[in-house]
Image: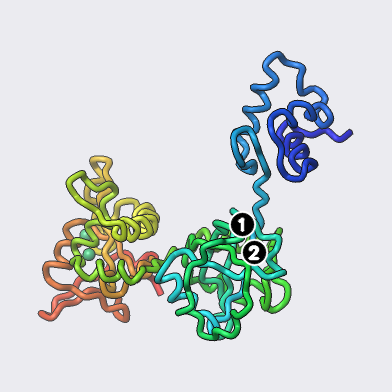
Amino acid sequence: MEKITKIQAIKKIILNNGGIADWSTIYTQIENYYPRAKISADWKEGLRGVLYRDKEIVKYSTGVFGLKNKQTWIIPCNIKKYDIEAAFCDNHTIDWTQNKSLLNLSIGDIIYIYVGGQIRNIPYKCEALEVNVKNQIDDTQFMLDRNFFEGDKNYFRIKLIKKMNTPDLSFEKLKANGLNGNCQGPQTIKNNLLKYIEEKAEICDEQLLLTNNEKHELCKISEEELEYYCNMSDLKSGYKETESLSRIRLVDKRIVEKLKNLYKGQCQLCGACVGLEFGENIVEAHHLEYFSISQNNDSSNIIIVCPNCHRIIHKCNFKFDREQMLFCNKTGQEIKITNPGHLKK
Ligand SMILES: [Zn+2]
Ligand SMILES: [Zn+2]
């Protein structure tokens, strides 16, 4: 018999029992796969320990376990038939038709949605939340071609994890990295292509997709206040943060953190490293195109500046001139960028 580990043995038991097993099944069958399983006195604790630590095992109910058979899919969306962008703007969860080619899909699966037509890219990373959805979300307003959806019976629910916009996930790049066919139907992905997509999705900036409510709320906040929120690592108690603001802050913070670390506390404008002598990195992020207007939180829209430069930018109404790579205001004053870094063209 091939040598396997304790956890592999438990997984075999689960698989060979139709994908589900309780403790008594595991206890009685473990020696078939792992002969030395019961050698030590606390063998039960040993089994429990490895099982609870394993991320691929899911608990169905008390003492009943299954395998998280996480698959990754690419599913195409025809935006002439379904306005997915608007649908995700309204609700970050949508119900998708589970036709024959998606019967194997299960809860926890990762779904990359490929948008064809002019876009030919993967803008959305989602997760399957639920299969055989009973109370379906009403999204008929986003169906641009209702006939297309007629007769659909089974739905699964997906949740948007990340909105992306990167040339690395274009059709050509996917093709070059092992994508089969023309992405006309759903497919599971493995090996190199999976590795490639996950890597690119991980490193690309996360785009904000704001619901209409969130956009509405955003209008009521000044740019400085908004940036203040985005720059603060933890809000002091006393600041009441709305749900939308906290989401904006969460997405923005990850990008801002990445950039702050890149410049190691140095201001891209004056070059000073204020605070570093005290062991503090106090640089701040400034949105080149005002975030309250553009809602653009790509790193290409962010510059890392010291608190002094930052105050001056806002106080003297400096606007960024991307062509000349400098800040200027109506008075004709200018601030040059000493370190263009990630903004370099
Ligand atoms: Zn500065
Ligand atoms: Zn600013």
Q: Quadrant of ligand 1?
A: bottom left
Quadrant of the rendered image containing residue 109: bottom right
Quadrant of the rendered image containing residue 22: top right
Q: Residue shown at 67%/78% (left/top)?
A: 184
Where in the figure is residue 19, as x and y percent of width and height? 73, 45
- Could you give the CA–CA distance between mark 2 and mark 1, rounded to whole angstroms? 8 Å
Label 2, on which residue? 73
> What kind of colouring is applied to the model shown?
rainbow
Q: Residue shown at 32%/66% (left/top)?
A: 302
Could you tell me which secondary element the residue under label 2 belongs to?
Answer: strand
Name the amino acid, label 2: Trp
Numbered label attached to residue 109 = 1
Q: Is residue 49 above or below residue 166?
A: above
Quarter of the picture holding the N terminus: top right
Q: Is residue 283 visible?
A: no
Name the amino acid, label 1: Asp
Q: Residue shown at 26%/51% (left/top)?
A: 232
Where in the figure is residue 117, as x and y percent of width and height? 57, 85
Of callouts 2 and 1, which one flags the residue occurring earlier in the amino acid sequence?
A: 2
Query: Horizontal placement of 201 versus 48: left or right?
Result: left
Quarter of the picture holding the C terminus: bottom left
Where in the figure is residue 210, as x and y percent of width and height? 36, 68
Q: Residue shown at 28%/67% (left/top)?
A: 287
Quadrant of the rendered image containing residue 106: bottom right
Quick check: marks 2 and 1 in contact, CB under 8 Å? yes
